[in-house]
Image: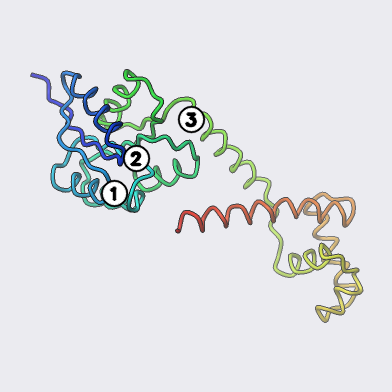
Amino acid sequence: MEARIRIGIVDDHPLLRQGVAAALKRIGDFQVVEQGACSEDAVDIALRLQPDVLLMDVNMPGDCFAAVRRITAEATGVRVLMLTVSESEDDAYAALEAGAQGYVLKGVSGPELVQAIRTVAGGESFITPAFASRLLGRMRHRQDMERHRIELTHREEQIIREVANGLTNREVADKLNLSEKTVKYYMTNVMQKLHARNRVEAVTALRRQWDEDHEQMLEMQGKAR
């Protein structure tokens, strides 16, 4: 007799959770071992029952990503598959970085959910295909941005920021206790690195980079919360 895939389901919406459980129970080699409604339940089910696959929602009471990290660390045989309505790329990245092996949207068809569970139970990763394309596109965009990122020295960054605030070379020199000749030297270096023809092009190019850095910082702060 073929070994059954033991499944835990954790979602704070009872009707949806019970509906998924009922559908999976009809699959011959699937066994739903337990259900829960919060992150704490997910950890309990993983540690106590050691299911092969644990379906978890992203948005439910408790810290979902912390729960995934703990399950990954303490219940190494349990493979976490996120089943969620969240199409947030940040949620997907956070879940996968925490150790989840799959990310499936709740609009998925029954056969596709079964395929996802079988895939994850077999030790492979599964992401809803259309959503995976979006994640891959964003990842490539980030990689492109990193390749084109301009690295400035501390002094170059200091000077171009003052120029961006509208100061002339003379005013920058006075503010930083430098000679005007030194400021011009650093500005020449900055424009060469940026392939900029003038100060306006240099500031415009760097403002885009500063905006991207600010967005990434806000993303990191959001994940930390």
The one of 113 and 93 positioned closer to us in this rendering: 113
Disc 1 marks a residue whose amino acid type is Ser
- Mark 2 or mark 3: which comes first in sequence? 2
SS assignment at label 3 = helix
- Mark 2 or mark 1: which comes first in sequence? 1
Residue 210: image location, x then y, percent: 69, 56
Figure quadrant of the C terminus: bottom left
Extreme residue toward the left, this view = 1
Q: Residue at x 92, y 74 (%)?
A: 170
Disc 2 marks a residue whose amino acid type is Asp
Residue receiving disc 3: 131
Spatial separation of the CA atoms under disc 2 and disc 3: 16 Å
Residue receiving disc 1: 39
Mark closer to the observer (3, 1): 1
Classify mark 1: residues with Cα within 10 Å, few (<14), some (14-19) or many (20+): many
Residue 131 vertical position relative to residue 153 in the rendered view, above or below: above
Figure quadrant of the N terminus: top left
Disc 3 marks a residue whose amino acid type is Phe
Spatial separation of the CA atoms under disc 3 and disc 1: 24 Å
The circle drawn on residue 57 is: 2
Residue 45: image location, x then y, percent: 18, 44
Spatial separation of the CA atoms under disc 2 and disc 1: 9 Å
Classify mark 2: residues with Cα within 10 Å, few (<14), some (14-19) or many (20+): many
SS assignment at label 2 = loop
Contact? badges 2 and 1 (CB < 8 Å): no
